Amino acid sequence: GQNIDQPTEMTATEGAIVQINCTYQTSGFNGLFWYQQHAGEAPTFLSYNVLDGLEEKGRFSSFLSRSKGYSYLLLKELQMKDSASYLCAVSTDRGSTLGRLYFGRGTQLTVWP
Amino acid sequence: DTEVTQTPKHLVMGMTNKKSLKCEQHMGHRAMYWYKQKAKKPPELMFVYSYEKLSINESVPSRFSPECPNSSLLNLHLHALQPEDSALYLCASSQAAELSYEQYFGPGTRLTVT
């Protein structure tokens, strides 16, 4: 089976830095995605890692270690609008059908003023 | 244009009704997906269409029937649903199902079954 684990909730203060961790155990690995989802809205793509290392995109960075089955999303200079659920999703191969996403349960981040 | 559109935005239906959800994308994507999402839970994959052919059916009950009339459109036909089917139904698309391209999600249809 596929197992993707991330914390349920996190809180942080405006202007701070927060790191959301994700660990995974999947049969096959074809990359890891992070999505942001505000309440009642669709998930929006944040980042994709397939090789080990850090990918930086403005205030957001994502790290992957394939040998450890571990990723994190780093959010800097937090703003109130960053309050949302952050979903870790792993893409696995499935025989001839690739690109199937398995989602973690999401981490609800609350940013306080 | 990186938009996936879905209609209707909200739908209330009785257990004996037949209704359809619609999804459209004009990004030239060849893979389209239906997900079901309950409150405070992650999206659960229901169906994947690749090049207009059903590629994955995640053992979804037959009261949900997907259809892909062409490469831009995806429908989900609903019939004899149960109250526990009430959820947010998300459509997504990606360049192709064979590789790990990011999926673009539509705003969803919030379905209530009474």
Image: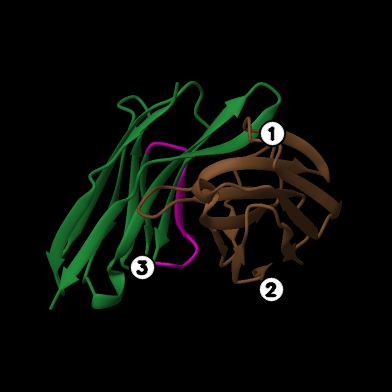
Q: Which quadrant is the C terminus of chain A positioned in? A: bottom left
Furthest residue toward right: B69
Q: Amino acid at mark 1?
A: Ile
Looking at this view, is B109 or B43 the one in front? B109
Asked whether A17 or B64 is in front, the reply is B64
Give the color of chain A as drawn: green
> In this rendering, would A105 be left or right of B2?
left
Residue B1 is marked as 2
Task: Tell if the residue under mark 1 belongs to the same chain as the one under mark 2.
Answer: yes
In this picture, is A19 found above or below A94?
below
Query: Do the CB atoms of the residues marked 3 and 2 lie less than 8 Å apart?
Result: no
Kindly check if marks 1 and 3 are in contact, taking CB atoms under 8 A apart as contact: no
The residue drawn where x is 71% and y is 25% is: A96
- Closer to the camera in the image, A50 or A112: A112
Callout in the foreground (3, 2): 2
The brown-coloured chain is labelled B
Q: Which residue is mark 3?
A: A58
Residue B59 inside the magenta-drawn segment: no
Q: Are marks 3 and 2 on the same chain?
A: no
Query: For the point 66% across and 48% down, which residue is it?
Result: B33
Task: Give the chain of mark 1.
Answer: B
Q: How far apart in space, not on screen, are marks 1 and 3 (Cα)?
A: 35 Å
The boundaries of the magenta stretch are: A39-52
Label 1: which residue?
Answer: B56
